[in-house]
């Protein structure tokens, strides 16, 4: 058989429909897929020693002759043992296999085999348990650096090894060199065919490193170039210039004096929007730093210039709250603010859509419902995305596409390290609100164990008696013994709230809210809590972002060890928003030292940036983007947190390339262009 990139796996020997189905689950249908199915790790199986030299506990290959007919014994149902002795010139090795009865006949006395495994010594005898075993001369998975692939049920690593090896040998060269010579040279990258071959069958770890570096660089290069293309289309284009003499009339509308940080950022927006190029700005500011006012200022400016503004919030609750407060703020200036969320009636939605299309409605606040077809604007001048990390790059692009190059303002409370920001936000300009409004006292934070539960309840009661309200956040929605197997103590919102009401606080007003409730129900509960009709609100992290209840003075988080630090910081930001002294109690039953230390970081600082850095170190980048929610294409080999240095090199290379050839129309970039399109297959509009 001659394998090419397009050969279906079903044509490989030994791959019937059942196995092919399982391979498909791993995303493998063709030889080309196999080639791009990268190992997650490697095992060094090269070290080969004689029996006498084998040191205990270290995995080694031993070449030895089977010295007797293997003996099989059935210990009990479901447990067979095969025992055999093997010898080399230096000594004897006792070998035991569990549940591999076929070896009784497969291992032939007098023949030599390679046994790979850890050697143990019992008295003077040496022994191995379940070694990888293959005949000498035919060895394929011993004596080499063995790739370890991500697996699924019914697909063994050995199978993948044999498939990828065959493919790497036959068609690594077919992939072709997509990177321009200049890039290969400037960044000292290995060739494509070498890299694809070596990643699956490395001769040494040094060569493997060269291969990996090339492939990671390449992937990050396409990512960086693709994102730059997505966003770069906006630069150099004319937008709606929105000159504004002075922000004073807007500032007069505010019930408070803005902080100097807020003023600075509003001024930055004013300068941006007065220019001929559309604004493209990210505002980062810790929870409670007052980002909404900046959005309102920007909206006010475009509306003064006869254009419309749209603000997209990640949850319905938040959208409603924003609509309300912005409406209150802007009404005196004669500006109407509309709401568009999924749970409104068709008639309500239709009305908003019509008013947007006619241009009569100046400002709309909504969820991703704003993105749906049929939502058209007469003159969209500004798009604001609140708590951006909840949206993908492409969602922001979709909203932007509803206008003619509107200004864009992205607001995020999750401070992210600079390199990651470059990838996620590309060429956005960044403003930071590094100051909290005056009069905020830091939220006092405590980490407590189960032994303090009763005291914690007592504290809840005390605050409620003082007229305050309390949030309690649980990690799960319902008790689901299967899903949470092994974690029986995980607090679930519904049962927790029921117990709390019946057993602990029969005299208090307790309610719960979680993401699985209907929007309307959620809405009602939140409104009741915001209106002071509830004392204790038990919830999942649906209340994590944005919602504002100044009377809430205590945030209790159950199973706190289950949350990322940035997430806990967000949750803590729900309290301490009014004049009342506020507290955050992190409850954990975890005995693990690392969990405790991690949570301790929350009591030490209230600086969101420090917490975010700590989080990145401890948990990787997933928390910043909610893993697959970030809208970035899925990477096969690169790791956005781990490969920072390569990431900035790849970004630089992509930038240089796009400076030379902004649309990638040159023949030397033809393959780069194709690769970017493949990587961004879900964002099909990238080149339109
Ligand atoms: P976030 O940055 O978390 O989105 P918000 O914009 O929701 O913060 O503001 C948090 C609270 O602080 C709101 O109640 C808002 O009215 C209030 N606020 C914002 N700026 C100021 C200020 N300069 N002085 C006093 N209160 C402010
Ligand atoms: Mg906010």
Image (cartoon, rainbow, N blue to C red):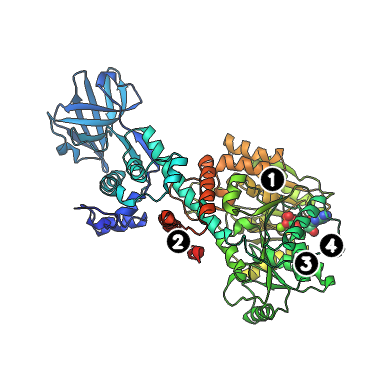
Q: Which residue is mark 4?
A: 246
Above or below: residue 125 compared with residue 337: above
Gap between marks 3 and 1 measured at Cα: 29 Å
Kindly check if marks 2 and 4 are in contact, taking CB atoms under 8 A apart as contact: no
Spot occupied by residue 676 in the image (x, y as percentages of width and height): 45, 56
The answer to which of marks 2 and 4 sits earlier in the sequence is 4
Above or below: residue 248 compared with residue 362: above
Gap between marks 4 and 3 measured at Cα: 11 Å
The crowding category of the residue bearing disc 4, from other C-alpha atoms within 10 Å (few below 14, some 14 to 19, many at least 20), is: few
Front position in the image: 656 or 10 = 656
Spot occupied by residue 628 in the image (x, y as percentages of width and height): 51, 55
Report if the beta carbon of the residue with label 4 is closer than 8 angstroms to ligand 1.
Answer: no
Q: Which residue is mark 1?
A: 608
Determine whether, in the image, residue 53 is placed left or right of residue 212: left
Q: Quadrant of residue 108?
A: top left
Gap between marks 3 and 2 measured at Cα: 37 Å
Front position in the image: 127 or 267 = 267
Spot occupied by residue 44 in the image (x, y as percentages of width and height): 34, 32
Q: Which residue is mark 3?
A: 300
The answer to which of marks 1 and 4 sits earlier in the sequence is 4
The answer to which of marks 3 and 2 sits earlier in the sequence is 3
The answer to which of marks 3 and 1 sits earlier in the sequence is 3
Considering the numbered disc 1 on the image, is that residue within a helix, a strand or a loop?
Answer: helix
Spot occupied by residue 200 in the image (x, y as percentages of width and height): 33, 42
Q: Which residue is mark 2?
A: 681
């Amino acid at each position: 058989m001659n394998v090419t990139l397009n050969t279906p796996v079903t044509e490989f020997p030994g791959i019937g429909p059942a196995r092919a189905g399982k391979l498909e689950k791993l995303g493998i249908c063709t030889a080309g897929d196999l080639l791009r199915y990268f190992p997650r790790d490697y095992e060094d199986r090269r070290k080969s020693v004689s029996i006498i030299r084998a040191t205990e506990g270290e995995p080694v290959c031993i070449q030895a002759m089977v010295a007797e007919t293997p003996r099989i014994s059935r210990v009990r149902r479901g447990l067979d043992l095969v025992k055999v002795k093997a010898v080399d010139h230096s000594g004897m090795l006792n070998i035991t296999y569990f549940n591999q009865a076929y070896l009784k006949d497969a291992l032939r006395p007098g023949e030599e085999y390679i046994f790979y495994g850890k050697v143990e010594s019992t008295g003077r005898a040496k022994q191995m348990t379940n070694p990888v075993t293959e005949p000498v001369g035919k060895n394929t998975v011993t004596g080499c650096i063995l790739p370890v692939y991500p697996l699924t049920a019914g697909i063994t690593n050995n199978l993948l090894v044999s498939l990828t090896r065959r493919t790497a040998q036959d068609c690594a060269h077919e992939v072709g060199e997509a990177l321009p010579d200049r890039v290969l040279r400037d960044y000292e990258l290995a060739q494509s065919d070498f890299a694809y071959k070596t990643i699956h069958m490395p001769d040494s770890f040094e060569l493997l490193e060269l291969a990996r570096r090339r492939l990671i660089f390449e992937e990050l290069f396409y990512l960086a170039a693709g994102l730059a293309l997505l966003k770069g289309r906006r630069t150099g284009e004319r937008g709606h210039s929105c000159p504004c003499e002075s922000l004073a009339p807007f500032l007069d509308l505010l019930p408070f004096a803005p902080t100097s940080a807020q003023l600075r950022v509003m001024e930055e927006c004013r300068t941006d929007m007065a220019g001929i190029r559309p604004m493209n700005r990210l505002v980062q500011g810790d929870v409670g730093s007052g980002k909404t006012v900046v959005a309102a200022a920007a909206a006010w400016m475009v509306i003064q210039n006869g254009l419309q503004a749209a603000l997209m919030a990640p949850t319905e609750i938040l959208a409603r709250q924003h609509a309300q407060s912005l409406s209150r703020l802007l009404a005196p200036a004669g500006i109407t603010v509309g709401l568009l969320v999924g749970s409104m009636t068709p008639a309500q939605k239709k009305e908003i859509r019509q008013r947007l299309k006619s241009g009569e409605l100046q400002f709309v606040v909504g969820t991703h419902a704003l993105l749906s077809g049929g939502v058209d604007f007469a003159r969209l001048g500004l798009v604001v995305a609140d708590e951006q990390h909840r949206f993908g790059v492409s969602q922001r692009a979709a909203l932007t596409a509803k206008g003619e190059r509107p200004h864009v303002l992205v607001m995020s409370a999750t401070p992210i390290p600079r390199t990651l920001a470059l990838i996620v936000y590309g060429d956005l300009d960044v403003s930071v609100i590094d100051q909290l409004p005056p009069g905020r006292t830091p939220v006092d934070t405590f980490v407590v164990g189960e032994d303090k539960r009763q005291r914690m309840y007592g504290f809840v009661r005390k605050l409620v008696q003082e007229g305050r309200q309390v949030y309690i956040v649980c990690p799960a929605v319902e008790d689901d013994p299967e899903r949470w197997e092994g974690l029986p103590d995980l607090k679930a919102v519904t049962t927790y709230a029921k117990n709390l009401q019946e057993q602990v606080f029969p005299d208090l007003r307790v309610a719960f809210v979680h993401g699985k409730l209907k929007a309307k129900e959620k809405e009602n509960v939140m409104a009741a809590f915001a209106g002071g009709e509830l004392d204790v609100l038990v919830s999942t992290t649906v209340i994590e972002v944005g919602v504002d209840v100044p009377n809430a003075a205590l945030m209790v988080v159950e199973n706190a060890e289950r949350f990322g630090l940035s997430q806990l910081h967000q949750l803590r930001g729900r309290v301490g928003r009014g004049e009342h002294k506020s507290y955050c109690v992190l409850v954990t039953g975890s005995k693990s030292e690392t969990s405790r230390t991690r949570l301790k970081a929350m009591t030490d600082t209230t600086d969101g940036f420090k917490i975010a850095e700590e989080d990145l170190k401890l948990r990787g980048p997933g928390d910043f983007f909610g893993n697959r929610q970030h809208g970035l294409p899925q990477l096969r080999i690169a790791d956005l947190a781990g490969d920072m240095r390569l990431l900035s090199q790849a970004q630089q290379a992509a930038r240089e390339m796009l400076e030379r050839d902004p649309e990638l129309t040159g023949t030397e970039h033809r393959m780069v262009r194709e690769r970017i399109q493949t990587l961004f297959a879900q964002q099909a509009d990238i080149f339109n």
